[in-house]
Amino acid sequence: MQLPELAFSCALAGRGRIDPESFVRKRPATTRCAIEVPFRTVIPNFYKRTPMSEQKLLARRAIVTGAASGIGYGIAQRFLAEGAQVIITDIDHPQGMQAAAELGDECEFIHHDVSREDHWQKVFERAREKFSGLDILANVAGVTLMGTIEDLDVETWDKTMAINLRSCFLGCQGAIKLMKAAGGGSIINIASVSSFKPQAELVAYNASKAGVALMTKSIALHCARSGYGINVNSINPGVIQTAMLDKVISQVADGEALMASYRAMHPIGRIGQPQDIASMAVYLASQEASFITGSEFTVDGGLGIN
Ligand SMILES: NC(=O)c1ccc[n+]([C@@H]2O[C@H](COP(=O)([O-])OP(=O)(O)OC[C@H]3O[C@@H](n4cnc5c(N)ncnc54)[C@H](O)[C@@H]3O)[C@@H](O)[C@H]2O)c1
């Protein structure tokens, strides 16, 4: 297996995570990766706890949805490293349980379909019970279901809207109740570069993510005017190396060609890693971002300007 394929399949098999040791050992010093996996992403302190005196989220109470894998897992991992207590949720029960076991004692998993209001109620009840409040919500769970305006059926449209958009509406609604009682908080919604850059075969995904981005601003405005101290922002990832990307690749006839085109679309020379998004999420969840609300943060290696 060539190194690029190795690196990529490692990441997919590990649900968006790379084992730094095995990757570093196998990488010949002279080989340049076609999928440019940055060493600063795979080697560093992301797997270690930040010293307590430097932790940006010390004792903060967080919920991260869609955290059994990919970007959600990466965000939960960084929140924990920065001193937060984290409830992770996901519809994938076995993988969610495994993720929580890997992430350690400060992390608990709740089985959760983000499109369902009754499931959200249970998640917030548990947050009330466990944390007596909530400081951070990261709405990460999402799906990419492909189809153009001519071939997408209405069930797929509705499913996309329910999982990607209704989920954020329900999450924000419940989180605001808990956060305003505690005097503030931070909500981070994961949108996408696809919220402003259309692709013909992503009609439902484009619409759902554009909805997330604008809904975030509307909610931010409401919270700011109400004096709740709740900041609400969204992140637009570029193409990130996760299981979701694998699914997209498997749904098209020539997946390799699509991957190559994704790589070429990022002027910075690589696709992203979950930790690239997690770094922004930590910042937005921290006190350093206290003057930021209703903003979109594009973390995409330049994809959006290409
Ligand atoms: N990977 C990318 O290139 C990319 C780019 C832009 C935006 N995003 C967004 O980032 C978010 C995370 O994507 P990812 O790449 O980590 O994907 P992923 O598939 O690795 O993770 C998504 C997680 O969401 C969970 N999920 C799916 N439906 C759910 C539901 N109904 N309820 C609860 N959980 C559910 C899945 O089980 C999975 O664990 C998504 O919102 C996605 O749209 C991803």
Image (cartoon, helix red, strand yellow):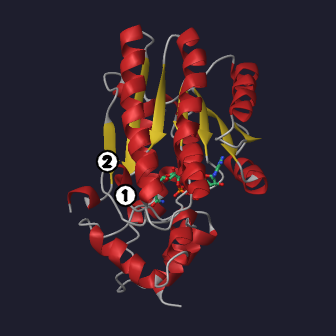
What amino acid type should be assigned to the residue bearing mark 2? Thr
The residue at 32%/39% (across/down) is: 296
Q: For this view, does 287 lie left or right of residue 84?
A: left
Q: Residue furthest bottom?
A: 1
Badge 2: how crowded within 10 Å, few (<14), some, or many (20+)?
some
Residue plotted at (51% across, 30% down): 57
Q: Is residue 49 visible?
A: no
Which amino acid does the dot numbered 1 rest on? Gly
Do the CB atoms of the residues marked 1 and 2 lie less than 8 Å apart?
yes
Q: Which residue is mark 2?
A: 298
Disc 1 target residue: 238
The quarter holding residue 226 reads: top left
- Where in the figure is residue 159, as x and y percent of width and height? 60, 51
Q: Is residue 21 above or below residue 181?
A: below
Ligand 1 rendered quadrant: bottom right
Can see residue 75?
yes
Q: Is residue 236 above or below residue 22?
A: above
Which labelled disc corresponds to residue 118?
Answer: none
Of callouts 1 and 2, which one flags the residue occurring earlier in the amino acid sequence?
Answer: 1
Q: Nearer the viewer, residue 47 or 248?
A: 248
Q: Is residue 151 above or below residue 59?
A: below
Point out residue 125 in the picture as x, y percentages from the top left corner.
Answer: 74, 23
